[in-house]
Image (cartoon, rainbow, N blue to C red):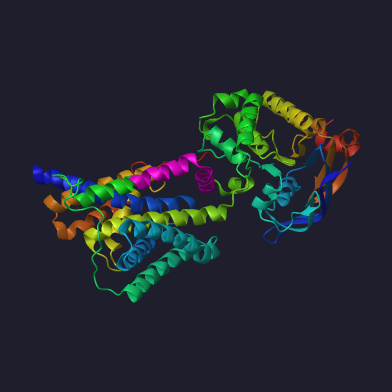
Amino acid sequence: MDAFLHQIFSGLANGCIYGSVALALVMIYQSTHHINFAQGELATFSTFIAWALIERGWPYWGAFFATVGISFAMGVLVQRLILRPVEKAPILTNVIVFIGLLVIFNSVAGWIFDYTIKSFPSPFAQKGPLATAWFSAHEVGSALVMLCVLGALYAFFRFTPIGLAMRAAAQNPDSARLVGIRVSWMLAMGWGLASAIGAVAGMMVAPVVYLDPNMMGGILLYGFAAALLGGVDNPGGAVLGGFIVGVLENLLGAYVIGTELKLSVALVLIVGTLTLKPNGLFGKHVVTRV
Amino acid sequence: MAKLLQATGLCAYYGPTQVLFNVDFAIEAGQITTILGANGAGKTTTLRAICQMVRTTGSIQIEGQELSGKATESVVRLGVAHVPDGRGTFTALSVEENLKLGGYVRRDRAEVARDIEKAYERFPRLAERRHQQAGTLSGGEQQMLAISRALMLRPKLLLLDEPSFGLAPLVVAEIFRIMRRINEEDGVSMLVVEQNASLALGLAHHAYLLETGSVALSGPSDVIQRDESVRRAYLGH
């Protein structure tokens, strides 16, 4: 029973990470209807930046917040320089651009920081006050950090004029322009936010899986599964999807299929959701009046 | 009287297709101007041309400032509010959020809040539904919301595309009554596009008649109303 509970709890902790990756995906999907395949590599690159800062002797939280800021700027730049020119291009063009970005960020990370596996520090002391019987200190800590990110995002979108403008721009770009919203900059903001969320997820997961240029590969797959399962147009659903995927992955890995085949849980969930319930569990079923 | 907006030699295109041909028109400050015409005459396109939502050549100036070549957002920031066809409400957002977005470019937060209250006074039904999703409102309520949202900009010029479209006659009458009041009390200049010619001529001071992308006739509304050809073709009597 203890082991069972432990699997569930550690699944929930992983779920936080998957949920935030899913949230980053949803953020870009909602405004552009594209899935950003480069989301994971961007996050990995951000994590390398944090690692480099810590190696240079920066305090952990200083490096953490600097990385979040740099990642935001990086996301904005990627949108302005690379995606804006193909904004009106067919969907396949965008997919190719995303794959290109994935390869570029992966290789540049490998080129600058090389491919050897690096350990990444956790800010939460092993024997600290956060450690409990069920969770390690890092699990509790990273879950708290992710919940803070979610809360901050919710408040941002719900209560600030820019957040409202971003929602408006995602929903109805033409009308948004007619109230004076600079829609194209709102997309860039969305990219910046997604990139910043990815950076936090990367820094929280790196102490567990170790840092190398392919670190986020598997996690991005779980993120996809979470986003699809929760409904790719529903931020809250994506986060819930993350928890579900995290727990399922852990339980199935421990009791049913073994840890080697864990990643196939994500694939099964993706294929299953797309065939059985394409809008996801909490997605909007869009009905149009003709 | 001072010209608020002046268009000269205005042409508009959808891709390679030209829709407006050398249209000249002017809007007097403080007045209601209407554009009449059959389906496909270019009425909606004229409004879209002002907001630079279509490709245009020629010149459109508001208070001497050239609009041609500007981004739609920048035209709006110069004080042009547009209620597009289909109303353009943010259906998944609440009534209150729609109104807030209308005042998005303004920096005077306290005044924006006051204007929201004013919109509720003008349309009490919006006040009852302020936290409701805009998409759940009736057609008339959505039109009221669309007009209120546009007014939140405190526009110099309000563009209205078929405000009567798809609404019951009683609702149309109410909306037109309020439009007139907005013009008289707040001095908002308007450019109204309407299919319903007698309704529009009853409201407007000045009218233009568009035929296949060109101005066929223009003049004060009461003169246009008496014009023999207009009566036969557009007023049906």
Q: Is residue A152 a member of the stretch shown in magenta?
A: yes
On the question of residue A278 being in view, the answer is no
Q: Nearer the viewer, residue A44 or A203?
A: A203
Examine the structure image and report whether residue A155 is included in the region drawn in magenta: yes
- Magenta part, dominant SS: helix
Q: Where is residue A215 in the image (x, y as percent from the top left)?
A: 28, 64
Q: Examine the rendered structure and indicate whether residue B82 appears above or below residue A101.
A: above
Q: What range is drawn magenta here?
A: A148-171
A184 displayed left or right of A41: right
Q: Which residue is drawn at 24% across and 51% down?
A: A14
Q: Which residue is drawn at 81% across and 46% down?
A: B210
Q: Nearer the viewer, residue B119 or B225?
A: B119
Residue sitting at the far left: A1
Percent x, y for residue A279?
Answer: 38, 45
Can you give x and y, in whole percent of width and height, for residue A86 in the image?
53, 64
Q: Which of B77 and A281 is in front in this view?
A: B77
- The answer to whether residue A209 shows anywhere in this view is yes
Q: Which residue is drawn at 30% across and 52% down?
A: A18
In the picture provided, is B68 more to the left or to the right than B117? right
Question: Image quadrant of residue A213?
Answer: bottom left
Reply above or below: A193 against B88.
Answer: below
State the quadrant of the N terminus of chain A: top left
Image coordinates for residue A200, horizontal then vertical, percent: 34, 55
Asked if residue A195 lies left or right of residue A210, the reply is: right
Near-viewer residue (A211 or B86): A211
> Which quadrant of the rendered structure holds the C terminus of chain A?
top right
